Amino acid sequence: IGFLQVKVLRATDLLAADLNGKSDPFCVLEVGNDRLQTQTINKNLNPEWNQVFTFPVKDIHDVLMVTIFDDDGDKAPDFLGKVAIPLLSIRGGQQTTHLLKKKDLGRLLKGSITLELEVIFNPVKASIRTFQPKERVFMEDNSKFSKKTMARNVARVRAIYGAIMSNLQYIKSCFQWESVQRSLLAFLVFVVTVWHWEFYMLPCFLALLISWNYFQIRFGRVSHEVSSMDLADDEEDDEKESERKGLIDKIHMIQDIVITVQNLLDDVACLGERIKNIFNWSVPFLSALALLIFVAAAVLMYYGSVRYIILLWGINKFTKKLRNPYSIDNNEVLDFLSRAPSDVQKVQYNEPRSSRKRRVL
């Protein structure tokens, strides 16, 4: 659907990985399953690469990962820092400086890297690709149990649950007539809505909601900035605890169950956060696309019959495999939601306030 051009200019004030107080840094750039590497600059903490790389863009919602390593020859390279840049956040033709982060992208490390990025893509093809399954990344690490990750995921689910319960409590307060004026208004809205309800009103309501949030953000009344959260894992503590208890089958079985629960909590939290982030314009491309779909759906439901729309949807689902034997059965809504970032990803991709991207003259 397009291409990404990355010019790796330089890095400054890197960590010293060698005994001589220097490093032999090189960069690894990743977009999806595509991976490219710069040359190694020997014995330098402020290397200048000035190399240009071009990636094909298969999904505009991919993230550019730039990792700096120290070349140790035959040994495994030492990690020096990492940054994550969503393609949709790129402003073409500008030199931007990013502070390096740790492997989990949660906390800052010493040093920074300066890049010049430009992405060109077809918005129509990008919109269509949004509703197709994401490309599987084969270089992802295997999941393992972490107490901090478990605690963080539980806190995220509790936050979403608390928001839902707060809204339900508000509705309940209307039923209880805690405020006569509010309850009377809610009752009138309920009666009028139910009496005149049509299916096209649902996407209309969603379009109004997402538009309202846009204007709230535009005029600075609310913000979709997320507070920082601890993304570090307590791997060493977990290993020591495992040694004390011993590596027995029963512990492994319990650990597998806990990992499943941990990942389930993560999936639930991610789903809720992604829905929220679409409506609060965290990714303007996705929010604008959702707004367009809601408006189009409202028009179709108003001028057409819902029966015919459902019939066309069913025919498409039943004949999809006949039309293309190699097609992958997917849920377009979930594929769309998978492109929105969760709050954890927003923290990982976010630049600290003190080091916002700045133009290099």
Image (spheres, rainbow, N blue to C red):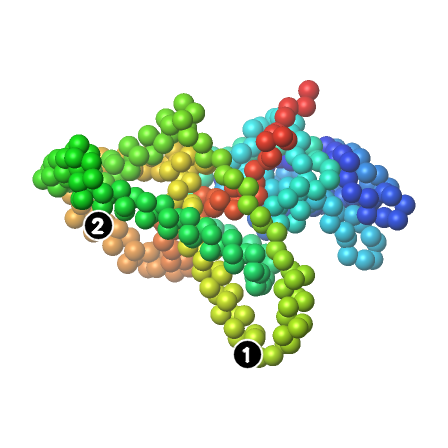
What amino acid is found at the position of numbered circle 1 in the picture?
Lys
What amino acid is found at the position of numbered circle 2 in the picture?
Ile
Query: What x and y, as percent, mark residue 84?
Result: 60, 42
Asked if one can make out residue 64 in the rendered structure from this viewpoint, the answer is no
Cβ–Cβ below 8 Å for labels 2 and 1? no
Residue 319 occupies quadrant? bottom left
**Which comes before the other along the chain, label 2 or label 1?**
1
Query: What x and y, as percent, mark residue 89?
Result: 53, 34
Q: Nearer the viewer, mark 2 or mark 1?
A: 1
From this view, report whether residue 240 is shown above or below residue 247: above
Q: Residue at x 47, y 46 (%)?
A: 342
Q: Residue at x 45, y 58 (%)?
A: 265
Mark on residue 11? none
The residue singled out by tag 1 in the image is: 250
Asked if one can make out residue 360 in the rendered structure from this viewpoint, the answer is yes
Mark on residue 310? 2
Q: Residue at x 68, y 23 (%)?
A: 360
Q: Residues within 10 Å of mark 1 (few under 14, many from 20)?
A: few
Left or right of 316 on screen, residue 190:
left
Q: Secondary structure at mark 1?
A: helix
Query: What x and y, as percent, mark residue 124?
Result: 41, 36
Q: Residue at x 56, y 75 (%)?
A: 251
Q: How many marks?
A: 2
Residue 321 occupies quadrant? bottom left
Q: Secondary structure at mark 2?
A: helix
Residue 100 occupies quadrant? top right
